[in-house]
Structure formats: C-alpha cells, structure tokens
Image (tube, grey):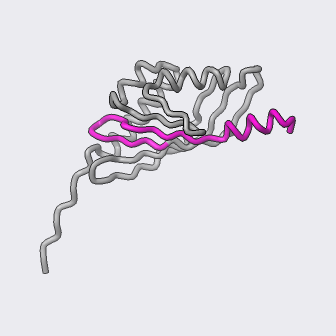
Amino acid sequence: MSAALPLAKPSCDPAEAARIVDAFLEASMRPDPEAAATFMAPDVRITFTGGRVFSHPREATAFNAARYRWVKKRILRNDVVPGETETIVYNLGTLYGEWPDGTPFEENRYVDRFVVRDGLIVSQDVWNDSAERILTRQAGR
C-alpha cells in the first residue's frame, strides 16, 4: 500500500478568500472603485449579466450608475470552494435600491462568483434578476 500524497495547499486560504471578497464588496457598495481595485489582480476579468466584460471596477460602477439610481447588496452568505491553485467564492444575496426613475426595488436575487488566487480576485462573474425586472417594468406588469 502506498503512502498518500500530500494535498496541494490552496493558493489562498478559504477564510482569507472570503475576507478578500467581503472587503471588495464593501468598497464596491460605497461605491469606491479605486479601493475595490486594490483587491483585484491588474488583469482581472469582470463579467456582468449579458456577457458585458470589464477590466476595472470603475467600469462596473459606471454601468451600474446608468442602470440604477443607486444599488446595494444585502449579502446572505459566501460559499467557499478551495482548489489546488485558487479558491472560488460564491457570494449570494439580494439587491435593493432605486431604478433611474426613483422607483424602489428589493429582493432582486444575485450570485457573484469570484476566483481568488495568490490573495487577489482574478475574475468576477455577476448574475442577477435585474434584466428580467426591467423587462417586466417595460411591459407594464
């Protein structure tokens, strides 16, 4: 019987990866895209719903400024998945805020998927119900 091989140590401790994501989200919700960028790798890839790709949090902030009068996250939890070379953090919750016309909204579900490697976020994928809600509003339902 052979000895078990040691498992590779993740490049980012799971608890540390969740802390990095939480700090990034806190800065993003201020919004302070420059502070948020300090938690991201220089070559980060941020992909929003609809396949919109950004390379810096300021681009995502500008997109959100056009879509919402203001928006915040009500974070429910982080699900953390450690890997050999990176740690994945799924951040789940709901969005609340105001549409550009000032109409309030809440309970808008979201999931963000972060890849954390060597202490920095290298990618973020964003999914939420905003597009569906916008279509519903436009249809008058």
Q: Horizontal placement of 16 versus 52: left or right?
A: left
The image quadrant that residue 16 belongs to is: top left
Residue in the image at 21% along x and 60% along y: 7
Q: Is residue 75 placed above or below 33 in the rendered structure?
A: below
Q: Nearer the viewer, residue 47 or 38?
A: 47
Image quadrant where one finds the N terminus: bottom left
Residue in the image at 72% along x and 25% along y: 99
Total numbered circles: 0
Q: Is residue 61 placed above or below 4 in the rendered structure?
A: above
Magenta residues (range): 113-141
Seen as rendered, the residue at the extreme bottom is 1
Q: Does the magenta stretch include residue 58?
A: no
Q: Is residue 103 placed above or below 141 in the rendered structure?
A: above
Residue in the image at 77% along x and 20% along y: 101
Residue in the image at 26% along x and 45% along y: 11
Instruction: Point out residue 77 in the picture as x, y percentages from the top left corner.
Output: 51, 44
The image quadrant that residue 52 belongs to is: top right
Instruction: Point out residue 84 in the picture as x, y percentages from the top left corner.
Output: 27, 53
Q: Is residue 50 placed above or below 31 in the rendered structure?
A: below
Q: Horizontal placement of 62 versus 131: left or right?
A: left
Image quadrant where one finds the C terminus: top right
Instruction: Point out residue 120 in the picture as x, y percentages from the top left corner.
Output: 33, 34
Seen as rendered, the residue at the extreme right is 140
